[in-house]
Amino acid sequence: MFQYASAQNLTMSSGEPPKEDDSDGDLAIATKPKSKRPPLYKVLLLNDDYTPMEFVVHILEHFFSMTHAQAFEIMLTVHKKGVAVVGVFSHEIAETKVAQVMDFARQHQHPLQCTMEKE
């Protein structure tokens, strides 16, 4: 009852097989956009002549989870060079750390300065 069409029956009247539309010849390739990593920010402590060294060590231990030895080394760097990087974080975390350190220093009436800058 049913007849299946053969490849010869699928030809056009001119005897050529049907062509696909390839007028521009270019293939569209779907590429997945690569997501960029968010920029990182350095948190810096600045030296001053009034904040006690022990207070700086306490801040580094408490807010940056450093050991006493690590905190002492960073404190000496701040004292000798005037500034030191105490951590590298995403923008939100760096901003929070800076605010926490500044608030804590103000509460204890110390002029310690903490800033952040893009890495």
Image (cartoon, rainbow, N blue to C red):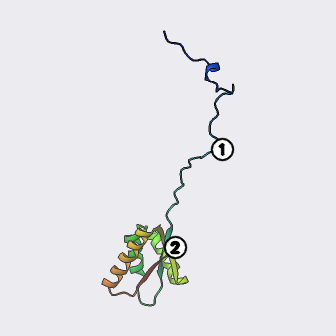
Label whose residue precedes the other's in the sequence (2 or 1): 1
Quick check: 43 above or below 14? Answer: below
Q: Residue furthest left?
A: 107
Quadrant of the image containing the C terminus: bottom right
Q: Secondary structure at mark 1?
A: loop
Q: Is residue 89 left or right of residue 110?
A: right
Q: Nearer the viewer, residue 41 or 2?
A: 2
Amino acid at dot 2: Lys
Which is in the foreground here, disc 2 or disc 1?
1
State the mark number for residue 118. Answer: 2
Q: Residue furthest top?
A: 1
Distance from disc 2 to disc 1, alpha carbons, whole Å, reads 49 Å
Residue receiving disc 1 = 23
Q: Nearer the viewer, residue 79 or 29?
A: 29
Q: Nearer the viewer, residue 37 or 68?
A: 37
Residue found at x 51% / y 57%:
35
Q: How many numbered badges does the structure rendering display?
A: 2
Q: Secondary structure at mark 2?
A: strand
- Where residue 50 appears, as percent x and y from the top left, is 42, 90
- Where residue 116 appears, as percent x and y from the top left, is 47, 76
Question: Pointer 2 and pointer 1: residues touching (CB < 8 Å)?
Answer: no
Q: Is residue 62 left or right of residue 32?
A: left
Quick check: 47 above or below 35? Answer: below
Residue found at x 35% / y 82%:
105
Residue found at x 45% / y 90%:
49
Quick check: 31 above or below 64? Answer: above
State the mark number for residue 38. Answer: none
Amino acid at dot 1: Ser
Q: Residue furthest bottom?
A: 49
- Residue 15: image quadrant is top right
- Where residue 86 appears, as percent x and y from the top left, is 48, 73
